[in-house]
Amino acid sequence: MDTMNATRTEQVIYEMLTENTGRHILDSGGESGRSWQKNQVKSLDDFRNEARTQFDAKYYDATVSLFHHLTEKLTYSQEWTETFNEVAASNAEMGWLELMESFPTVMGWERLFTENSYNRESLLSQVIQYSVYHTGNEVLVALQIHGGADVRGGYTAPRIFFMDYEYDLLSENASIFCTGDAVDSDGPHRFDWSGGEWTHEGDYSKEFDPYAMSQRADLLKLDYLPCAICGAPMRDGAQR
C-alpha cells in the first residue's frame, strides 16, 4: 500500500499514535513498554493493513484497532487545530484537558461532553480522551490519544477533527466469528459488539458474550471456545 496515498486524517492519527508522550520512572512502562514506543516501530502502512478487530479465543478478548476506529469516523481540521493551538499558546498555564474543555467557551460554541474511554467498557486498542463541541453548524471533537503506560498521564497534544454525530466515538463496532466446523453447522456465525453488548443477527443474549462461551467451555471441559449457536470453535486472530 502506498503511504503517499494516505489521507491527511490517516497521517495525523499516525502522528498521534507515534507521538512521544514522555517517560516517567513511576509509570510502569519500563524502558520501551509505552504505547508510543511500541507504535514507533510500525509504519503508517502497518496500521492501515492491520485487522480492524483482533480476537483472542484463549482469553476471549476482542480488541478494536484504534487507528481504524478513528480514521473511519473523523476528518482532520487543520484550521481548527491551528486555532486551538493559538488559544493554548495564550493560556500556557492551563493543561491540555482544561484547554479542551474551555476552548468552546472562547469560540462561543457549546461543549456537549468530555469522555475518557478508560472510564467505561471499551474494546479500543488504546485509551482516548476527547471533548465534543457543537459549533451551531458542525460537530467537532478535540482528541487526545493515550500513549503512556499509566492512564493518569502520557496523552498526546490535542488535534481537532470533524465528526458526523456527537456519539460516533462511543460506537465501537466489532464482529467476531466461529469457524463453522461443527456437525450440522450452518456457520460460520457472527457476533457483533455494539452499544456495550454482543448480539447475533440483531438479537441480544448473555450467551453471546465470549465470557459466557468460556463458562460453557469449562462446564463441558472443552479445550476451545465454543460458538454459542453451533458449538464450533470460535475463530482466533484477525477479524474483518
Image (cartoon, rainbow, N blue to C red):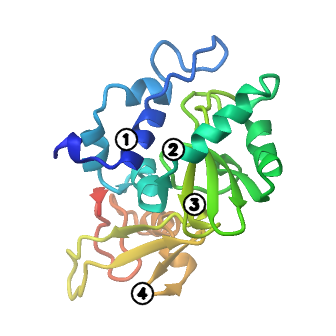
Q: Secondary structure at mark 4?
A: loop
Between marks 1 and 3 in the image, the one whose residue lies nearer the viewer: 1
**Picture quadrant where residue 165 is located:** bottom right
The residue lying at 43 percent from left, 34 percent from top is 15
Mark pair 3, 4: CA separation: 23 Å
Q: Work out whether 173 lies above or below 91.
A: below
Between marks 3 and 4 in the image, the one whose residue lies nearer the viewer: 3
Q: Pointer 2 and pointer 1: residues touching (CB < 8 Å)?
A: no
Which amino acid, mark 2? Gln
Q: Which residue is tagged 3?
A: 169
The disc, 2 or 3, on the residue closer to the chain's N-terminal end is 2
Q: Which residue is tagged 2?
A: 78
Q: Which residue is tagged 1?
A: 11
Which amino acid, mark 3? Leu
Q: Which residue is tagged 4?
A: 201
Q: Nearer the viewer, residue 197 or 179?
A: 197
Between marks 2 and 3 in the image, the one whose residue lies nearer the viewer: 2
Residue 1 locus on image (x, y percent): 16, 46
The residue lying at 76 percent from left, 58 percent from top is 113
Mark pair 2, 3: CA separation: 20 Å
